[in-house]
Image (tube, rainbow, N blue to C red):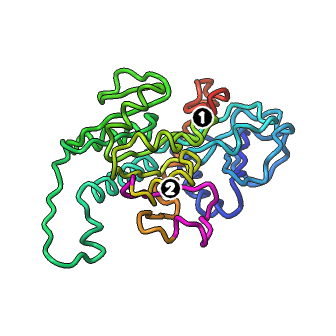
Amino acid sequence: MTVVLFAAGAALWPEYEAPLRRALAEAGLAVDLVCAAAPEAVDYIIYAPGSPVQDFTPYTRCKAVLNLWAGVERIVGNATLVQPLCRMVDPGLTEGMVEYVVGHVLRHHLGMDRYILGAKGWEQIVPPLARERRVAVLGLGALGLACARALAALNFAVEGWSRSAKPGLGIAAAHGDAGLEAVLRRAEIVVTLLPKTAETENLLDARRLGWLPEGAVIINPGRGALIDDDALLAALEAGRLGHATLDVFRVEPLPEDHPFRAHPRVTVTPHIAADTRASSAARVVVENIRRGEAGLPLLHVVDRARGY
């Protein structure tokens, strides 16, 4: 009997048990889904950051570790993890991210805060059309590309950027250091959707923030470490940037006394842009179990060298 260990934490078990069992039944897989098992008997581990499983050495039979989160930075560097690691690429998670990004891009594009926050008088400030608004999406993985295409479908002038070339995406895209400078110098709204790696940490530092046009807006639902916090606050204080909408932070929950909390040009949302939904995530996990049992290549395997 194939043994699948749910090691994503006791708090998530009530949420995931029924969807996982349902997905396993739909896939015709007869497995033993458990919360505890002898390590040498486990074939697959369903994982989330904060799991009690931190030493993978005893799991000698394990064929794959299946992460419930899109981010893997808290596990990818674990030296005991020699099994294949698969990150979560969930259609439901992607939909949620697209909705968050499109909603906040439209909010800033249309200048809705002016009215939502109770502007007085009758100041009729007409925004440009979407095709006249340049939006940069940094990161063209599954989430970034989906957001870029959704914004392009609304006629925004979208430019994407990735660390390496990604041709044939159907949107304008640049790569490398020179490409990043060119994209940022044109961007009125910037969306950051890169993974956290050694190469992307503090990607938006004081120098690169200085490339942005005056009044530009940043939306970060990717990773808190992508932006230098002090440099961002300095740019906002100086009036160089118009606003920052932030969903992710270096420390979460964001401390109550953090300067972002009270800053008039910062919107803080509590890491809600794209959550993993048990019903759709369970099907992603089970599909990899099915593929593993059938001897097929696993989906969404993490490249350890790149960190995602």
Local crowd size for mark 2, using a 10 Å CA cut-off: few (<14), some (14–19), many (≥20): few
The quarter of the picture where the N terminus appears is: top right
> Which element type, helix, strand or loop, lies under badge 1?
loop
Name the residue tied to disc 1: 308
* Residue sitting at x 60%, y 72%: 256
Residue 275: within the magenta? no
Q: In this view, does 53 lie to the left or right of 70?
A: right
Residue 95, position as x, y percentages in the image: 39, 49
* Residue sitting at x 29%, y 43%: 150
The disc labelled 2 sits on which kind of residue? Answer: Ala
Residue 107, position as x, y percentages in the image: 29, 59
Residue 257: within the magenta? yes
The disc labelled 1 sits on which kind of residue? Answer: Tyr
Q: Depth check: 61 or 306 in front?
A: 306
**Considering only vertical position in the picture, is 220 above or below 84?**
below
* Residue sitting at x 63%, y 64%: 14
Q: Depth check: 271 or 297 in front?
A: 271
**Considering only vertical position in the picture, is 112 above or below 56?**
below
Local crowd size for mark 1, using a 10 Å CA cut-off: few (<14), some (14–19), many (≥20): many
Total of numbered circles in the picture? 2
Q: In this view, does 20 lie to the left or right of 99?
A: right
Residue 289, position as x, y percentages in the image: 61, 37
Name the residue tied to disc 2: 234
Residue 42, position as x, y percentages in the image: 77, 41
**Considering only vertical position in the picture, is 26 above or below 145?**
below
* Earlier sequence position, callout 1 versus callout 2: 2
Residue segment shown in magenta: 240-261
Q: Depth check: 104 or 231 in front?
A: 231
Q: Distance between the residues labelled 1 and 2?
A: 31 Å
* Residue sitting at x 62%, y 54%: 250
